[in-house]
Image (cartoon, helix red, strand yellow):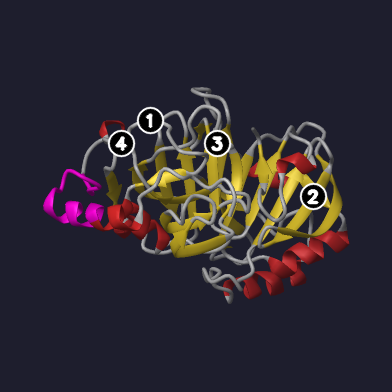
Amino acid sequence: MRNIDSSILSRRALVGASLAFVAAPAIAQQVVKAIADLKPDEFTWHPERSPAGPVAIVVSIPDQRVHVYRNGIRIAVSTCSTGKPGHETPTGVFTILQKDKDHHSSTYNNASMPNMNRLTWDGVALHAGRLPGFPASHGCVRLPLAFSEKLFGVTHVGTPVIIAGAFSDPVEILHPGLVLGTTAEGRLETEEASLKSKALPEWDPAAKSTSIIISAADQIALLLENGRQIAAGRISLAPERKLSEHVFVLVDADDTGRSLKWHGVGYNDANGQAVEPPEGSILQSIKAEPDFRRLVHDRLHPGALLITTALPLHPDQRTQGGFVIMTA
């Protein structure tokens, strides 16, 4: 594995850190305090706030914080350390491609990278490591050891990770029907019933996770499974609609059987710039070709992603099954 962060705990140091966690609670500890007051290695963890549902992770580079949302509700915040100057952590939307609880680097002297959630095949991941209080990694997102263990337990292959300079909290969106265009009512009821019978993907590598990427610049939609493109189709947008950087996570069909429930997050790579949360009208403004639409509907499941961007889908923004969409 190339370019993964080398400044992490060796196996011997990791054992010491675990013992220190028991003997000295000030290190890598769970706390109850304001997010802005968290010190390096501190985190909050409240899974009881939302016991079930799709998970989404947001990494705020300016704040050096990781926010964990489940079913649209924030259940955890942790300090982190992202890439140092010259090795900046890329911003954009990623999905977890691989999980390894006891990962070791093939590049940096077999260095230990506990609780690794891989974001790209060329070396960006979430994993436990040293947190000095500022960006210090070689591109990875380092986490407190105890937090990384908890996070590892709630993610799966396909979990979205948004790395941003600014972002909005998730908002709930009800879309009247299926996405990417109109569907006959009988088919709508059948497909929503099918959706209700599906569960979140397991986190094992064999699981299939669906992402749909919509580019306003290219007027094209891509369908991906486990980060790999399987189809593309032309799309059209309502004349008044301008797409920007948004991520929609599918929750489920609502109780009426006529709408899908999504959680939407807006983001950008600018430090301190306000981000407007997405609106439901965004989903309604996108129309796709019937064949592409059918492929999408057949693969929808709780936790599926729909990502919109104003950017063209240039190959440099994605690697071999790695990036979903990279903004910088």
Q: Is residue 28 above or below residue 157?
A: above
Disc 3 and disc 4 in contact, CB within 8 angstroms:
no
**Element marked by disc 3:** loop
Residue 134 circle label: 1
Disc 3 and disc 2 in contact, CB within 8 angstroms:
no
Whole-angstrom CA distance, mark 4 to mark 1, is: 16 Å
Q: Label 4, on which residue?
A: 35
Q: Label 2, on which residue?
A: 221
Residue 184, magenta (yes or no)? no
Tell us which disc is closer to us: 3 or 1.
1
Tell us which disc is closer to us: 3 or 2.
2
Q: Label 3, on which residue?
A: 277
> Start and end of the magenta stretch?
16-31
Give amino acid for label 2: Ala
Between 211 and 27, the one nearer to me in the picture = 27
Whole-angstrom CA distance, mark 3 to mark 1, is: 28 Å
Residue 169 seen in this snapshot = no
- The residue at 26%/58% (across/down) is 15
Give amino acid for label 3: Pro
Q: First in sequence: mark 4 or mark 2?
A: 4
Tell us which disc is closer to us: 2 or 1.
1
Q: Quadrant of residue 311?
A: top right
**Element marked by disc 2:** strand
